[in-house]
Amino acid sequence: MQMATISRWTLAFFGCALVALLLALLLLTSGYGYPNAAVAAPETLIVVHLIMIGWLSLLMLGALLQFLPVLVGRELALPRLAPMMLAAIVSGLALLLAGFGGLSGWSGANADLMPLGGSIILAGFVLGAISLFATLLSAKSLPLPAGFVAVALMSALVAVLMGDTLAAALAGLVGGDFSIALVTHGVSLHAGFGLGGWLTLAAVGVSYRLLAMFMIAPERKGLWPQIAFGAAVLALAMLCGVLGVLLVSSTSWALGLGVAGAAALAALAAYLADITALYRSRRRRALELHMVAAIGAFAMLGLGAALLFWAVIGNSEAGAAAAVYLLGLGWLSGLGLAMLYKIIAFLTWLECFAPLMGRTPTPRVQDLVRENHARHWFALYFAATLLGGAAILLSAPALLQGAAALQLAAVLLLAHQLIRARRLADLPEPWRNHPRPRLLMPTPRQRSFP
Amino acid sequence: MIEPYELDVRPLLRNGGEPFAAIMGAVNNLVPGQGLKLYATFRPEPLFRVMEVKGFSYEATPIENGEWQVLFTPQETDNSLASRARDNDPDNWPDPAYFLDCTDMDPPEPMVQILAQLEVMPEGQVLFALLEREPVFLFPELQARGHLWVGDFDADGAAYRLMVRAGKAD
């Protein structure tokens, strides 16, 4: 019988992820990295990897530890790997960033730390993939959202493996034509597997299920989700083909990239159409805040994808950078923040009040948060992200710093709300004195029945 | 102490007959607490398992000519293997006493409603609930409170049907 319990490590993943996001926004606010430095400069890479690995990947892995078992109806396999995974990714990331720092001339830091950090990050992702794949394989059948997650996990491994190889090439550990070709053509592939294959497909899979669950809408079936999945798999297969050509002949394969891009656009279009239908078919009339905020993220996905398409056709570096900014901070981060806002309240509610359900009156999940405050912070976040994208497009570094400062403020305010929710600080009167849970470690439930 | 019901299947066995139906017929007619004294031409090993599951202990004694007398005594405790096996099997549950339609409720309202209803139901009564989706976060709570449940999706997969048999209050 399918059963879902609270994942012990999910909140620790979320906590580390939020710290990484705040650090990245702090760096952007101070003018660190692009556009004051080049796109491929170590300073830019520090900010990008803080966001992609520290914030988004930890957020996604933490969410998958909790929701993959719900998706496939099985307990999480090998749950003991979770803390090792977290420790490996966090320490590997610290070494990787120090290695980038070494490239940019930090005293005491050495570029050789990059491949070492990359290897440790890879080990962390392998541990995660083992646990999550074992969970997937124990399922009787794989619903479509789980299919997205499975493909995303494979893509994550390719992205990290490529990243580690790139780090070795940049550190001068591998040389020759291959390393030149990899550094010239491999970076966009690495980004494609990471941002597109891993993070976006995992977000698509998780969002399909979470949105249907919280809006009381039927699970998506039929043609649109099939098209989205098929096109996404085709896009990834073409990217693998391009990677294969690069490995064999050290050249870029333009046709393969073109097909991959077209398939990715088709997948995103089908997904966005499907999500629109999902919102329309919901039975819950009034939208909760996280559902409204998610709409902002979907808009950013459409906007970012269109901008990326335009930038690739027009060969515009600023356009591509702005698109990656909108996709990373608008789409993925926006969706992540929106879902965190609900997931943390929901998990906290379950932890504190599930044992009391039916025995004494319990608060609503929404009583743990104050939506009327947070809606302003979400609005501020998305407006600032849009402003930041425009600043990159217009090559206005000062404007980008201002936008990042506003984003930082919005995330701080939202994080404050999340901590208040965890501390039960906003509960109405009857539950004011309810015992508070620990911030990052849920207490396992005592069972009265074997 | 009620006298055990006596059943002699030796004539039946000597005539090449199959005694199982007769034995089960006798078992089903026992009054609560009554035992069964059985006479057979051999030591009826397979029957011991069957009777154990039904909640009887046995005491087998050889009598003359290699024949056997077995006394089956019903177990007093309520949570015997037999009653638990009976409770676990939804076919033995009574018809649902309560129906809840949770299809239009916001999560986690279905959980709250179902558990609140179970709190006021006596042990053994059955609740039927209709849900929008599989209530995966409800199951640990049902288990923790000692309720038994079965559930599945209806034919077109649009609704989840859940039957819960109320357990003992902790």
Image (tube, coloured by chain):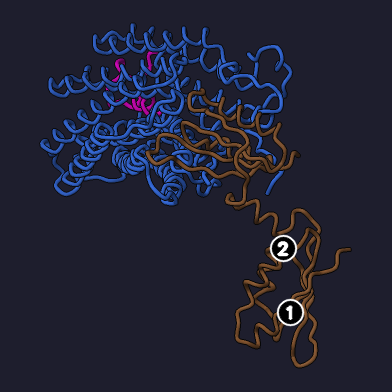
Task: Chain letter for brown, please.
Answer: B
Q: Nearer the viewer, residue A49 or A15?
A: A15
Q: Which amino acid type is shown beneath numbered disc 2?
A: Asn
Locate residue A264 relative to residue A406 in the image: left or right: left
Measuring from the top left, give residue A189's x and y in whole percent: 24, 36
Residue at (24% x, 22% y) in the render: A305
Measuring from the top left, give residue B108's x and y in whole percent: 55, 26
Q: Quadrant of residue A259?
A: top left
Q: Nearer the viewer, residue A392 or B89?
A: B89
Q: Examine the structure image and report whether residue B64 is included in the region drawn in magenta.
A: no
In the image, the segment drawn in magenta is A30-51
Where disc 1 sits, the SS reads: strand
Q: Residue furthest bottom?
A: B65
Q: Earlier in the sequence, mark 2 or mark 1?
A: 1
Q: Which residue is mark 2?
A: B29
Labelled disc at residue B8? 1
Residue at (77% x, 68% y) in the render: B57
Locate residue A194 relative to residue B162 in the image: left or right: left
Would you say residue A3 is visible in this rendering?
Answer: yes
Q: Which amino acid type is shown beneath numbered disc 1?
A: Asp
Chain A colour in the picture: blue
Count of labels shown? 2
Q: Residue furthest right?
A: B1
Measuring from the top left, give residue B67's x and y in whole percent: 74, 87
Residue at (31% x, 16% y) in the render: A299
Q: Nearer the viewer, residue A303 or A364?
A: A364
- In the displayed structure, would residue A309 be above or below residue A114? above
Would you say residue A94 is visible in this rendering?
Answer: no
Q: Examine the structure image and report whether residue A50 is included in the region drawn in magenta.
A: yes
